[in-house]
Image: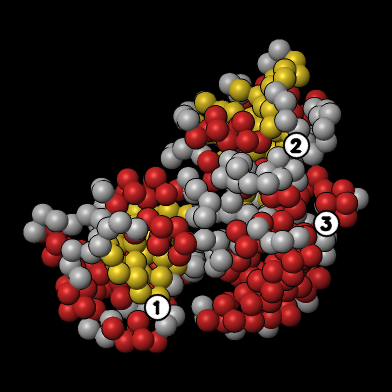
């Protein structure tokens, strides 16, 4: 059991809100975290993929009232979207009695159905949290935590803890196959698994590049609007991230297309058949894989209200990750996979465009040092700790 940083936040939110929705892809550790949180308090766990547990909720209001003083864990809740209306009634009744908070912990693989139903039925009654893959600080006590193991294998707990690299990639390949053949069809879309696999693999090859829907559509033999639909699906399932470009009042021509990342680095490597760190070192995806890994960990550690972007002008001035803390309050982060990072002129020009307050370079080394008087090079775990303390 890894100590997940989100545990403390969920505990706090349950004291303040009636329901907390914990979203994330399958196998990311939602159920493990929820059961750990429920230890030592009256609770009941229902897996809504289990027919027996779904049967218990044929009359949800009655069943939930039988367990009125317990924390109720509802797992894979997207399987029962009609349940949200009943939850709203139960929550509102308990609010009127002055005992409304900390009642439900809802777990789900994010989907259009889940978000649509809950946003309509539980508006103002639920707080959303996303459980991401394991981060460097969460595995710091594990063997090889300072090695590239987490980057290579990704943040899914079973992949990271596999006995060796071969077992890890076999787990990831099975995960990909299961998602394509079982999980995605269960969520509604009827898209051939072979087509989605090709699309997912193409995104891995184009990791961190600007979205070119026409190029992807041509390669797949479909229309651009179909590519957009596939991308929406993968993003809704928290498997792919669109990092939006920053737009503002600067006298520059700015790039308008988002950058697209397969969110888990281990899945990137499995899709590209990169089996070990030696293979990763020699692969063209090496730098972009590190970039995506760093960006996912940064976003997972961001305080509420901080928005991530990238910045790029038509002339080539560029910031890999731009954090917007508020009006005219920016941090610029350059991401380098080399142990001796070299910063291009374009990064400093972009920083001048926005008058950034802090310039940082994240690299896979272990030391922190100044690159020049206004730029600091630091390892990823140190940046994450800095963000968590804000």
- The image's mark for residue 48 is 1
Report if the CB atoms under discs 1 and 3 are less than 8 Å apart.
Answer: no
216 relative to 363, above or below? below
Q: Secondary structure at mark 3?
A: loop
Q: Residues within 10 Å of mark 3 (few under 14, many from 20)?
A: some
| Real-space Cα separation, disc 1 to disc 2, in angstroms | 41 Å
Drawn side of residue 328 relative to residue 241, left or right:
left
> Of tags 1 and 3, which is closer to the observer?
3
| Real-space Cα separation, disc 1 to disc 3, in angstroms | 37 Å
Report if the CB atoms under discs 2 and 3 are less than 8 Å apart.
Answer: no
104 relative to 178, above or below? above
Q: Residue at x 72, y 26 (%)?
A: 367
Q: Residue at x 26, y 73 (%)?
A: 85
Q: Residue at x 23, y 67 (%)?
A: 88
Residue 14 is at least partly visible in this image: yes
Q: Secondary structure at mark 2?
A: loop
Q: Residue at x 27, y 58 (%)?
A: 41
| Real-space Cα separation, disc 2 to disc 3, in angstroms | 17 Å
The tag earlier along the polypeptide, 1 or 2, is 1
Drawn side of residue 104 relative to residue 389, left or right:
left
Between 239 and 5, the residue placed more toward the observer is 5
Label 2 belongs to which residue? 364
Residue 306 is at least partly visible in this image: no
The tag earlier along the polypeptide, 1 or 3, is 1
- The image's mark for residue 276 is 3
């Amino acid at each position: 059991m890894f100590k997940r940083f989100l545990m403390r936040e969920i505990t706090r939110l349950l004291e303040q809100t009636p329901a907390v929705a914990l979203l994330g892809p399958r196998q990311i550790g939602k159920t493990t975290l929820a059961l750990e949180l429920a230890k030592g308090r009256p609770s009941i766990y229902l897996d809504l993929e289990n027919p027996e547990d779904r049967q218990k909720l044929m009359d949800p209001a009655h069943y939930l009232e039988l367990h009125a003083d317990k924390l109720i864990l509802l797992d894979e809740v997207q399987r029962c979207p009609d349940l949200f209306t009943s939850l709203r009634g139960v929550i509102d009744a308990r609010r009127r009695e002055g005992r409304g908070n900390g009642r439900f912990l809802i777990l789900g693989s994010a989907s259009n159905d889940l978000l649509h139903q809950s946003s309509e039925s539980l508006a103002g009654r639920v707080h959303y949290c996303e459980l991401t893959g394991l981060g460097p600080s969460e595995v710091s006590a594990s063997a090889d935590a300072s090695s590239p193991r987490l980057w290579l294998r990704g943040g899914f707990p079973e992949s990271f803890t596999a006995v060796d690299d071969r077992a890890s990639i076999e787990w990831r390949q099975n995960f990909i196959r299961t998602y394509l053949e079982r999980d995605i069809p269960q969520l509604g879309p009827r898209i051939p698994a072979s087509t989605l696999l090709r699309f997912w693999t193409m995104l891995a090859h184009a990791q961190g590049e600007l979205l070119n829907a026409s190029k992807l559509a041509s390669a797949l033999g479909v229309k651009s609007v179909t590519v957009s639909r596939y991308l929406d699906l993968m993003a809704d399932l928290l498997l792919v991230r669109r990092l939006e470009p920053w737009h503002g009042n600067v006298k520059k021509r700015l790039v308008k297309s988002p950058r697209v990342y397969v969110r888990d680095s281990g899945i990137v490597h499995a899709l590209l058949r990169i089996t070990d760190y030696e293979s990763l070192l020699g692969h063209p995806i090496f730098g972009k894989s590190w970039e995506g890994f760093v960006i996912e960990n940064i976003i997972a550690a961001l305080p509420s209200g901080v928005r991530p972007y990238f910045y790029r002008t038509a002339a080539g001035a560029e910031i890999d990750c731009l954090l917007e803390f508020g009006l005219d309050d920016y941090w610029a982060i350059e991401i380098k996979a080399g142990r001796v990072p070299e910063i291009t002129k374009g990064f400093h020009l972009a920083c001048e465009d926005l008058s950034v307050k802090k310039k940082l370079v994240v690299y896979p080394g272990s030391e922190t040092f100044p690159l020049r008087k206004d730029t600091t090079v630091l390892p990823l775990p140190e940046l994450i700790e800095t963000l968590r303390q804000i």
